[in-house]
Amino acid sequence: MNAEYAGQWMLKAKSDLKIAEDELKTENPATDAVCFHCQQVAEKAFKAFLSFHGMAFEKVHDLEYLKSLCLQKDNSFSKLNVGDLSSYAVTV
């Protein structure tokens, strides 16, 4: 387990969440940017979980892949629907 490394991932995830929440409070939110940051929150939270449990993962933005790795440790991840959120990672 690497709690310190996992904590670093979670700090990054919290920053992305703050950006998304702050943008949604504006008069005309940039919804594509909000979706991007929400994807980043999920990705970084998955990576935090994997890091905490000492599980290796590829450097990817694919939430389904990361979720599948998390499922190897905790079946409750099956309840999460990450759907098309991966498409907001870095695509144009």
Image: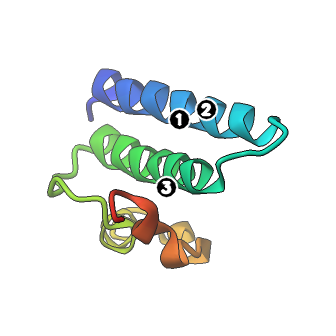
Q: Residue at x 16, y 53 (%)?
A: 59
What type is the residue that disc 2 sits on?
Ile
Q: Earlier in the sequence, mark 3 or mark 2?
A: 2
Disc 1 target residue = 16
Question: Camera-side residue: 83 or 25?
Answer: 25
SS for dot 2? helix
Disc 2 target residue = 19
Residue 1: quarter of image: top left
SS for dot 3? helix
| Mark 3 → mark 2, Cα distance in angstroms | 12 Å
What type is the residue that disc 1 sits on?
Asp
Question: Camera-side residue: 43 or 50?
Answer: 43
Q: Residue at x 35, y 32 (%)?
A: 6
Q: Is residue 36 above or below residue 86?
A: above
Q: Earlier in the sequence, mark 1 or mark 3?
A: 1
Q: Is residue 57 above or below residue 4?
A: below
What x and y, as percent, mark residue 3? 35, 27
**Residues tagged 1 and 3 counted as in contact (Cβ below 8 A):** no
Q: Residue at x 33, y 57 (%)?
A: 90
Q: Residues within 10 Å of mark 3 (few under 14, many from 20)?
A: many
What x and y, as percent, mark residue 41? 51, 45
| Mark 1 → mark 3, Cα distance in angstroms | 9 Å
Quarter of the figure with the C terminus: bottom left
Checking the image for residue 65, the label placed there is none
What type is the residue that disc 3 sits on?
Gln
**Residues tagged 3 and 2 counted as in contact (Cβ below 8 A):** no
**Residues tagged 1 and 2 counted as in contact (Cβ below 8 A):** yes
Disc 3 target residue = 39
Residue 17: quarter of image: top right
Outermost front residue: 28
Q: Is residue 63 above or below residue 46?
A: below
